[in-house]
Amino acid sequence: QVQLVESGGGLVQAGGSLRLSCAASGRTFSSYAMAWFRQAPEKEREYVARDSFAGSFTGYADFAKGRFTISRDNDKNMVYLQMNSLEPEDTAVYYCAVAKGPYGDTTMSAYEYWGQGTQVTVSS
């Protein structure tokens, strides 16, 4: 059974940093893209960043470029999201996801497995 467990969320002041982690289990994920999405209150879930298999490609939403960095450790089945220069608008529940294939894309439909999410709150 595939499981994704996010951690690392919390309350941080604007301008601060957080590092989110996602532990994946149930199979080997090195052949699949992994991604982070987020969902703010009363808003739709949106794409944040993705990392293709073997780290051959990383992509970011415009709001994440220059501030967020996605990385993965295939030996540990882990994916991370380093978030710097956080803003109150970054407040959301952050979800990691495993794609159906090696590259993924920016849409939720490209992802097969999802974690339960971790709350990130940025105060002004």
Image (tube, rainbow, N blue to C red):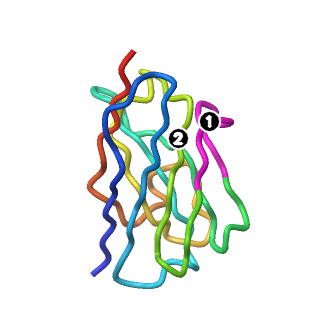
Q: Residue at x 37, y 45 (%)?
A: 94
Q: Which quadrant is the C terminus positioned in?
A: top left
Amino acid on which disc 2 is placed:
Met
**Residue reaching furthest to the right:** 56
Residue 40 in percent (x, y) is at: 34, 31
* Element on which disc 1 rests: loop
Callout 2: few (<14), some (14-19), or many (20+) C-alpha neighbours within 10 Å? some
Give the residues in magenta: 59-70
Q: CA distance from mark 2 to mark 1?
A: 6 Å
* Element on which disc 2 rests: strand
Marked residue nearer the N-terminal end (2 or 1): 1
Question: 74 above or below 91?
Answer: below
Q: Which quadrant is the N terminus positioned in?
A: bottom left
Res. 93 image quadrant: top left
Amino acid on which disc 1 is placed:
Arg
Q: Residue at x 44, y 46 (%)?
A: 37
Question: 45 above or below 123?
Answer: below
Question: 9 above or below 91?
Answer: below
Pointers 2 and 1 in contact (C-beta within 8 Å): yes
Is residue 61 rendered magenta in the image? Answer: yes
Residue 64 in percent (x, y) is at: 59, 36
Res. 104 image quadrant: bottom right
Question: 88 above or below 12?
Answer: above
Is residue 45 rendered magenta in the image? Answer: no
Along the viewing direction, whichever of 31 and 101 lies nearer the viewer: 31
Q: Residue at x 61, y 72 (%)?
A: 102
Q: Which residue is under mark 2? A: 83
Callout 1: few (<14), some (14-19), or many (20+) C-alpha neighbours within 10 Å? some
**Residue reaching furthest to the bottom:** 27
Q: What's the mark number on residue 27? A: none
Q: Which residue is under mark 1? A: 67
